[in-house]
Amino acid sequence: MSSGITLQDRQSLVGSGGPFEVNTRFGTIEIPPQTAILPLVTNGGVDSLPAVTLTNQNTISGLAISVTGDPVSGIFGDGVNGVLVQHCTIASASATVFSFGIEFIGSTQGDLIFRDLTISTFSEAGGSAGIYNEELFSGGDVLFENLTISSITNTDISIGGAIVFDQDFAGRNFICRDSNVMGSHLGVAFFDFLQGNFICQNNSIFTERKREDDDVGGAILLGSFFNDSFFQGGDVVIEHNTIRSLESSAIQIPHMASNARAIIQNNNVTGNDHALFVGSDSGSFSFHILNNSLSSITDEAVSVGTSGAVDVRYWKNTSFAQGAPSDVLFDESGGGLLQVESPNLSLSGVEALGEGSILAPGVTFIPFE
């Protein structure tokens, strides 16, 4: 198939190269792959023509999707309500404009499920993203499971990101697990309000540089530095990941709204600027940083600030900052109340465990056994 296909509501496009589950009155039956290779679907190299165009409640499974053009998307949906994409490979390449593996525009809603995918996108002089949502997402769950994504751009003007949500996320749960994702500038990123739970488990996330014009970059970016976007409500859970950013901070939460909770535990995190950065104008929230290896090159490995009331539990972490006077900075200069608990803290704020040191002017410490 070399000229693309547009699906109707509730249609499935299923190739013979992957397993497929069928619901029957006797339960779910899995049909095993019928061929050793994935059937190929392309756009014939036509600009702006996706290989597959979605409507609502579509299923794509067991296909090899390959597209080229300026711009181009492997799978495209406008105002989609629900989709399942699984057991596919998607390759997208452009010369001067955008290259997307899976692209959504319009108001997207419902459950979006992406499972067992290999996505590679490349643009020589434009933007590149593995999975990209341009506008509002609302009212459902988003699941990324067992994905391998490589999203590369050779320019530092447009964004190269593995998973990017450009506008508000107002869903229930965002879950990314058991995946290996790499983006030129961004790994998993949100540029606007993030409402609901963010769960990131058992992933390897890597970025190689940041964008030149505004320094945007990072393996995990929850909210924007430029428009006061917040993570608000729900929980942030980041655990059992290997996270690395060569030119930027690895985990960034520029604005943390009130009544939110973050748990960052059992991760190996390396950032050029910070391994973990939480913005100083955040609201009132609780933050648990437990049993991580955190390292940085130019700034503190961990930087947490607030203008609200923040309760931080910090313990069993190994931190190292190569180019900063302290490994960890808790900063209350924004006018908030920052309270830190740790079994390893003395009243002077020095971390006894490992070789890390903490700088925390004006912060209240609560040692515990």
Image (tube, grey):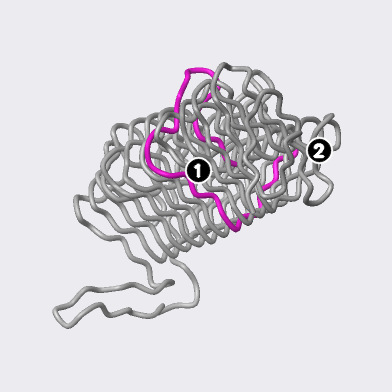
User: For the residue labelled by badge 1, is the local secondary structure a helix, a strand or a loop?
Assistant: strand
Determine the image quadrant of residue 155. Answer: top right
User: For the residue labelled by badge 2, is the local secondary structure a helix, a strand or a loop?
Assistant: strand
Where is residue 315 drawn, in percent x and y? 66, 49
First-in-chain label (2 vs 1): 1
Q: Taking 192 as reference, is 278 left or right?
A: right
Where is residue 32 drawn, in percent x and y? 38, 80
- Work out whether residue 289 or residue 279 is closer to the camera in this orientation and state it: 289
Which disc is residue 262 wearing? 1
Above-or-below relation of 326 to 175? above
Determine the image quadrant of residue 107. Answer: top left
* Alpha carbon separation for disc pair 2 and 1: 22 Å
Amino acid type, callout 2: Ala
**Residue that carries the numbered disc 2 in the rendered image:** 321
The quarter of the rendered structure image containing the N terminus is bottom left
At 24% from the left edge and 45% from the top edge, which residue is drawn? 81
Q: Is residue 312 magenta?
A: no
Amino acid type, callout 1: Ala
At 46% from the left edge and 50% from the top edge, which residue is drawn? 199
Q: Is residue 233 magenta?
A: yes
Going by the picture, which residue comes out furthest to the left? 25
- Work out whether residue 173 or residue 259 is closer to the camera in this orientation and state it: 259
Where is residue 267 drawn, in percent x and y? 64, 53
Q: Taking 305 as reference, is 33 left or right?
A: left
What span is colored magenta in the figure? 220-246
Q: Are marks 2 and 1 in contact (CB under 8 Å)?
A: no
